[in-house]
Image (cartoon, coloured by chain):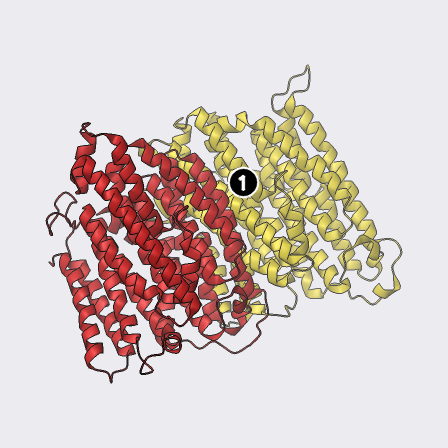
Chain colours: A red, B yellow
Amino acid sequence: MIGAPTLEIAVILLGAGLLLLEAFSEKIEKEAIAYAAIAGLIVILLASFFVAPAPVDHPSAFWNFYATDSLAIFFKRFALVTTIFVLIMMIDYAPTVRSLVHGVTSQSGLGEFFALPLFTCAGLMWIASAVDFVMIFVSIELVSVSFYVLVSFTRRNPATLEAGVKYLILSAVATGFLVYGITWIFGVTGETNLDRLSAALTSGHIETAPALFGMVLVLVALGFKIAAVPFQIWVPDVYEGAPTPVTAFLSVGSKAAGFVVLLRILRPFFILPQVQRVLVIVAILTLIYGNLAALPQSNLKRLLAYSSVGHTGYLLIGIVSLSGVATSFYLVAYLVMTLLSFAVLIVVANQTGEKIQDFNGLGKRSPFLAFAMLVAMISLAGVPFTAGFLGKFFVFDAAIQQHQFALAAVGVITVGCGFYYYLKVVRAMYWEEPKDRNAIPISGLSRAAITLLLIANIVLGVYPQPILRALSL
Amino acid sequence: MLLLILFAPIVAAIAILFGAPARRTAIVAATIELIGTGLLLSRFDKGAVGFQFVTAWTINPDWGWRFALGIDGLSLIMLLLTAIVTFAAIWFTAEISRNENAFYSCLLFISAGAIGAFASIDLFFFYAFHELALIPTFLLIGIWGTGNRQTAAWKITIYLAIGSFILLLGLILLYRSLPAASRSFDFAVLQAAASAGQISTSAQQNIYLVLLIGFGILISLFPFHTWAPEAYASAPSPVAMLHAGVLKKFGLYGLLRLAIPLLPAGALYWNKLLIVLLLGNIIYVGLVTIAQKRLDWMLGYSSVMHMGYIFLGIASANIVGIYGAAILMLAHGLSIALLFAITGELRRRTGTLVFEDLGGLAKVMPFAGFVFGLAAFAAIGLPGFANFAGEVLIFFGAFRRGANMLRFETFQVATTLALWGVVISAVYMLRAYRAVFMGRMESKWSGLPDLRNSLRLPITLLIVALLAVGFFPQSFVQIVTPPFRSFFAAK
């Protein structure tokens, strides 16, 4: 058996080692670093199956900051899988990076591009285990700082620069809110540990108003991370401007991290009914805004940005309904469908572009890519026999169990909107005629990754048992 | 056997996507379906209560969630309808100019979705299989449709998607309304729990309304019907045959399978509302049908209108009315498929379906005219055809509900009004027949060829089925009887 913190340490060492390798050997092909990173992460992913989960009230390391319950281990694997797929996309994206980063050699900057996601991954894995506000803050910062660099990586592209600045400033402000909120909560209760916090809140000796105020500030910061209305304004511009693999990473990894933290910190705070009421309103607004704003988009990356806001709404339904299983399953479904759509987008955008009309006639040009995109889109829309449908199914079930009928009703209507804008992509691929009939070239590795994600989308839509079992341990 | 019938079209569809010869593979799959269903019919135990030929694999034991297939009499009739109409639809498919493989593949997926929905005895798969047909329909209408195909495809897809998700909410509500110990996705377990009175009356009323709206959108219940005529008018004729003939019956099947047996108190509570809506289907949509100027739109509206009769049978909630609804579902599926098939052939030859441009076509296409006439008579409900048997049973069943000798109650008034629907459908069907096949023919149509000889096979199949049910409805009623007899006896 391996101790859980070993996993993060291994990821950090892998990242640092690759950076050193990159610094001292200029001659190597920089893609080799990406392959080494992928291989290393796969080994760590396999190692994670030898980590025994422990109950949450037996924190194991770092002065009780760190839990190794099944939820933590589950999201560590989640972070590892996401990073592996992001690295595969980055290899495909390397030519664009090359053309936009003019360094001394043709390969300048690529090494960092491939190594930085490892640090983000380590941060995400720490967030999964964090059960103390100090630890939560530090690991969120590790993720944010590495994202600052990644988002603005292709800095010669003005759109990217704009995205980088926007993300930096707003994320810094959100961090400020987070710290301020934590200090209020600490000031009232004298605790940062979530377990002891909930004991303090139930004791009845606490003034709830300042604790609530602190909680609202923390929710503002997390609302920024998960892109919930009204903290979603940055999403479309940053998603559109950032390098596409980073966008994928941001929309899956960063969002999952935010939701894990929400799941952990809301448990003590749901003693206060006001928190739940606020979240119901946020969820409804997020559902409506995300899905309505996605309707007129013509740029696929921007469309996926708004759809990511919409999915935050469905995830919030799970959160409000206090269902860790529904939320976690939805996140897994979100991972496989979002990464699949971004993987296809990167391959296609290398040849044509990121607009929806650039996908015209893809069904004739590259039936495989078109079919993968079709599955990704119907999964995002929520058609049965795909992972996305089961995600919605569990979330709605959780809402009905908690008698949140208004949420469920709004959810159903916005699903209808979703069908429209996701099927717009399908329409472009199958109804329209292509401008150019040549097949789009695709590397063996990407083909394997896309096939894997495609199969995962369908298998999880019929047989979700492996995920449910991993969550219930 | 059920697995074979379900997976024959799925495997064939995937094989076709990977490059197998499209038409041949599709016909083989449809033939397997047809023969398989025939074998099921011959080996079906008419006396037994409960599901037969059950095969099941557990997905999640905590939820009572299994991939489970099984049939009773009602599902068998629906399977029979699906197999016959699929075979006819695939046989009727003419040359496809672009991307033939994808076309057949989508058709087979629709057929598989229908079979899966009718043969599943698990709540989840019952729902999921129906949705399997949604995306192929979107593609089929959008790519190969005619007329205003884009609007029609969007409209049907979004309407049905919202309808399905409302239905999903209803099904989850149903599942959650049971006490934890008896929660299950299994139809038989649900049925047992409901007969034991474990669903409270107020829960039944709320859930029934949600289910009625969800299923109602799928069935094109007035006022949720506007997607249907446009979609059927634009769809390629095999798609219209499958969708109007088979898929739309899913909602009715769902009401008969879930809403009536599990939520009888809810059905009772909302009966007045349902009657108003179904009269909207019969009278209002019927009058709209008369006003149509194009054959395809007229057929689309007529199929919406006929749903009203089936709703009347379901609303009557007595054994005669339910038999009638089951028989009429089969009959309407067969007759509307035949009408759409002939219409598709006409459109291919003339390029127009506007009544004013057509006329006298029986002179050049006598066989097509003869078949269209038979199908139209069936749709009107002429004795001898299956539709007559169904409608008569429905009217008797509905009239008997709450009847007393002193005055007419709700159901008697509704039945009387609904009877006028027969007159309305005679008016529009006969007018359409006259406009297309009788009268003076324009000279430009004089060279039109009649139907290909090979089409006689599916046509014969459909007409023989219509006549067989029409002359021997008793044998089909016997099949449907056991599940409902036990239900109504228990009440």
Residue situated in front as seen by the camera: B97 or B77: B97
Residue B137, picture quadrant: bottom right
Q: Residue at x 60, y 21 (%)?
A: B402
Quadrant location of the N terminus of chain B? bottom left
Residue situated in front as seen by the camera: B101 or B480: B101
| Rendered position, B475 above or below B357 | above
Q: Secondary structure at mark 1?
A: helix
Residue situated in front as seen by the camera: A279 or A367: A279
Query: The numbered mark 1 sits on a residue in which chain?
Result: B
Residue A101 seen from this side? yes
The picture places residue A193, in percent across and down from the top left corner, at 16, 43
Residue type indicated by callout 1: Phe
The picture places residue A424, in percent across and down from the top left corner, at 54, 59
Mark 1 residue crowding within 10 angstroms, few (<14) / some (14–19) / many (20+): many
Q: Residue at x 37, y 70 (%)?
A: A155
Residue situated in front as seen by the camera: A465 or B485: A465
Residue B324, picture quadrant: top right
Residue B382, picture quadrant: top right
The picture places residue A178, in percent across and down from the top left corner, at 27, 47
Which residue lies under the disc numbered 1?
B215
